[in-house]
Image: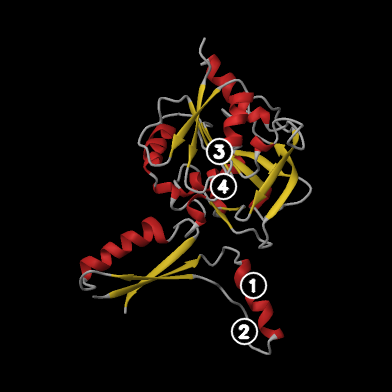
Amino acid sequence: MDAARVGVITFPGSLDDRDAARAVRLAGAEPVALWHADNDLQGVDAVVLPGGFSYGDYLRAGAIARFAPIMTELVGAARSGLPVLGICNGFQVLCESHLLPGALLPNAGLHFVCRDQRLRIDNADTAWTSEYRSGQEVVIPIKNADGRYVADADTVAELEASGRIVARYLDVNPNGSQNDIAGITNEAGNVVGLMPHPEHAVESLTGPSADGLGFFTSIVKRLVNA
Amino acid sequence: MARVVVDVMLKPEILDPQGQAIARKLPQLGFEGVAAVRQGKRFELELDGPADEAALEEVRKIAETMLANPVIETFEIHAL
């Protein structure tokens, strides 16, 4: 059977699109390069929005990328169930697109933070986390300037009550995120936004662990069984 | 040609560490009596035509669509 096809969108200023594509390949799927200015998702089975500084983070992180032509296609497809993972800048784009609630603001400490971060996977039922156990602790790098997750009190309460917090920071909260939130999902569980970078933790040669690979093998398993 | 200003501010309940950093610096510079600082953004839009009702309504749409993120920010519009 043909390998699952996972698209990776490149915006002007994307940095981690190649690493994301490599992680997709290591997980056993075929990465498909998608371009921000196209109106075509090329029939992919899932999409990764990679990290970086799309459009220089001008105005707000993700605010301009949200209006890229391909995002019109992506928002519609995501609402119809297409699995989408937004990493770092990709998470910011998903919030700006209103596919996920809340927003990501400059780190509370006002410094760019780059470190290997301990996390706990709190929701192992999403399209992107089924290969983890709920409560599993992992080490995955973070590197962000605008990683402080905020939402109004009702939204955070709703996320907590419905188990939509996918991952939480352990040991230290690197950016002042509410409730130590490192990642969330939409109600359907197909759209996940994550501030840490699982694509930088897919093999021991280049990462602190291979703990991030599970995000990519989760989606491959989902697509193969679909 | 008219110019319209859009002022964007973080909602009051949202932490503004940049404003706090400015506020902390002021006493060191000898400025007393400032209890708090909030930092925002100001946009100046130069219009092709006059800043009439319809133009201001268009600017409002621009503000809520792009200049401000209503999840975290509020905005005010006024013509210069």
Q: Quarter of the image for the C terminus of chain B: give it.
A: bottom left
At a point 54% along the width and 16% down the height, the residue shown is A224
Q: Nearer the viewer, mark 3 or mark 1?
A: 3
Chain of the residue under label 3: A
- The answer to whether B27 is drawn above or below residue A34 in the figure is below
User: Circle 4 sits on which residue?
Assistant: A52
In this view, the residue in front, B2 or A121, is: B2
Residue beneath disc 3 = A17
**Sequence-wise first label, 2 or 1:** 1
Q: Chain of mark 1?
A: B
Identify the mark nearer the N-term, 3 or 4: 3
* Front residue (pair B62, A15): A15
Give the class, few, some or many, for how many residues have Cα within 10 Å of label 1's Cα (few <14, many ≥20): some
Q: CA distance from mark 2 to mark 1?
A: 11 Å
Residue that badge 2 annotates: B34
Q: Is residue A164 above or below residue A129?
A: below
In the picture as drawn, the residue positioned furthest to the top comes out as: A1
Q: Is residue A73 visible?
A: yes
Residue type at mark 1?
A: Gln
Residues at marks 4 and 2, CA–CA distance in whole angstroms: 37 Å
Tell me residue A196's x, y (percent): 65, 43
Residue A29: x percent and y percent?
56, 21
Circles 2 and 1 in contact, beta carbons < 8 Å: no
Disc 4 is attached to a residue of which chain? A
Label 3 to label 1, Cα distance in Å? 35 Å
